Image (spheres, coloured by chain):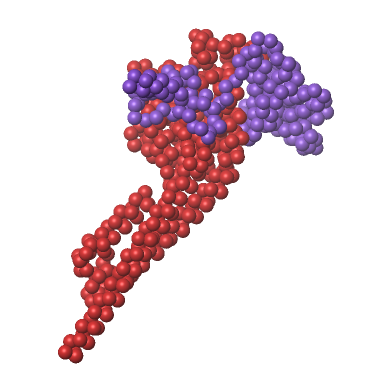
Chain colours: A purple, B red
Amino acid sequence: MFRQASRFLINRSSAATMRWRRPFSTEPPVETAVDSKFFDAWKQTIPNIDPPKTPLAFMKPRPPTPSTIPSKLTVNLALPYNSLVSAKEVDMIIVPATTGQMGVLPGHVATIAELKPGVLSVHDGNEVTKYFLSSGFAFIHANSVADIIAVEATPLEQIDPTLVQKGLAEFTQKLSSASSDEEKAEAQIGVDVHSALNAALTG
Amino acid sequence: MAMAALRREGRRFAAPLISPQPINPLRSSISPAEDQAFLGVRSISTQIVRNRMKSVRNIQKITKAMKMVAASKLRAIQTRAENSRGLWQPFTALLGDTPSVDVKKNVIVTISSDKGLCGGINSTSVKISRALHKLNSGPDKESKYVVLGEKAKAQLLRDSKKDIELCLTELQKNPLNYTQVSVIADDVLKNVEYDALRIVFNKFQSVVSFLPTTATVLSPEVVEREAESGGKLGELDNYEIEGGETKSEVLQNLTEFQFSCVMFNAVLENACSEQGARMSAMDSSSRNAGDMLDRLTLTYNRTRQASITTELIEIISGASALEG
């Protein structure tokens, strides 16, 4: 009887530490200790309803900061419609920050950079892939993971130079004839993007 | 709801037929049967059962068609929702996920569908929103609602009318895209004062499983406050800020961008969940209609055979009365 009791106790304690396991699911494991404050507060005030999930539960945890500088940089380029680059290991990237082109190597200091419309180039060994970004943000974390989030990104080969020239002329004309502040701002944005496109194609 | 009404009517209709007595006072409001009774038919006419069967068959066809439509819409939108999942992950990796943050002004953004017949997902969202409202109201805290979608608006207007700040409907008139969502996000950010935005939606796990989820986006002042006080956002200070004049300007752009990205993913996931829930609701509805049709067919045959038997008995007893 006491043997059964010990087995029962072990089962109970392991069940408590085991979270709800779904043997056929490939989702990452359920909430980490970070959210426990929320769930405890929920369970206290609203015991009848299950608490909702939070985004952390659906995300793969990021690797911790290594002690030595890693050799490769992990790049994620995310757009609303697609992730063009996800978890690719590269040597260097150059991002178009508002303060100018910024080169990022593995072991770069943690940075949050606001981006302006410009070219992102990804250097992996000898091959260089260039994308034109329409502004966004770039986060470089201490563990040599770079996240770039942009609204639009196209490979440079797909941009049509004649359309760029036409757009640039159109927006410059709109800027000169703009009356309200809003129109001026819109026209200015158009001019900025098109001149950056121009520079990207020629430079 | 349509199925519940059908089930009720089916029960009400089947009960008088199943009982043992051949002559039954008709309890349901079927007057043509009474007319037929005057003409000499002693049980319920087959005409009524036939009409019932026709309408149930039509409902089965309609719900089957709705299921196919929902399945095709789901296929179209599912790839887009899965592609947009990479969008919010960098923000959560940087700013963490802090649903337990303690702020004065909470705004709960509830995302729901405009059309009905999609199972229980809208009620789930509203339940969670109300629970979050309760969790976040106290002596110096308050919560307000921003509602997207007709269904949640109808439910929340009933008892939380004064807490609703903004209502947006007809999101899916045009296919969902980032521009539309960023305009909505801009609307919300301009018109609503907030310290924390809690977005409630149903995350699409699979065609049969939808998990209610809440994503939290903090305002730039709260982000700075949490970064200074340490804890989850404490590492934010270690990040160098490139671009912009001041850190707060960059933080403001960052939180606004985060809100629009998280909203985009949330709206897509909710749309997927809506189509998936509609698929399974319509599937169970057509299965139910099929069961009801089977039961009605049996009733119909029984009625038909009973009337034939009655006629035969009358003829034979008349003939035997003539003979002897």
Question: At 82% across and 24% down in the image, what residue appears?
Answer: A126
B168 sits to left or right of B249: left
**Vertical placement of residue A42 versus B224, above or below:** below
Residue B167 placement: quadrant: top left
Residue B73 located left or right of residue A201:
left
Q: Is B225 or B164 nearer to us in this picture?
A: B225
> Where in the figure is residue B184, as x and y percent of width and height?
53, 33
Is residue B192 something that shows in the picture? Answer: no
The reply to whether residue B293 is visible in this rendering is yes
Question: As displayed, is residue B113 above or below residue B213?
Answer: below
Q: Quadrant of residue A60?
A: top right
In front of the other: B195 or B278: B278
Image coordinates for residue A14, horizontal then vertical, percent: 43, 22
Q: Is residue B150 above or below residue A35?
A: below
Q: Residue at x 43, y 57 (%)?
A: B60
Residue B78: x and y, percent?
A: 57, 40
Location of the C terminus of chain A by quadrant is: top right
Q: What's the residue at 56%, 49% (across, down)? A: B72
Q: Is residue B307 left or right of residue A15?
A: left
Residue A87 or residue B308, whichever sits in front: B308
Q: How many marks overall?
A: 0
**Residue at 46% over, 24% down:** A18
The residue lying furthest to the bottom in this view is B323
Quadrant of the rendering where the N terminus of chain A is positioned:
top left
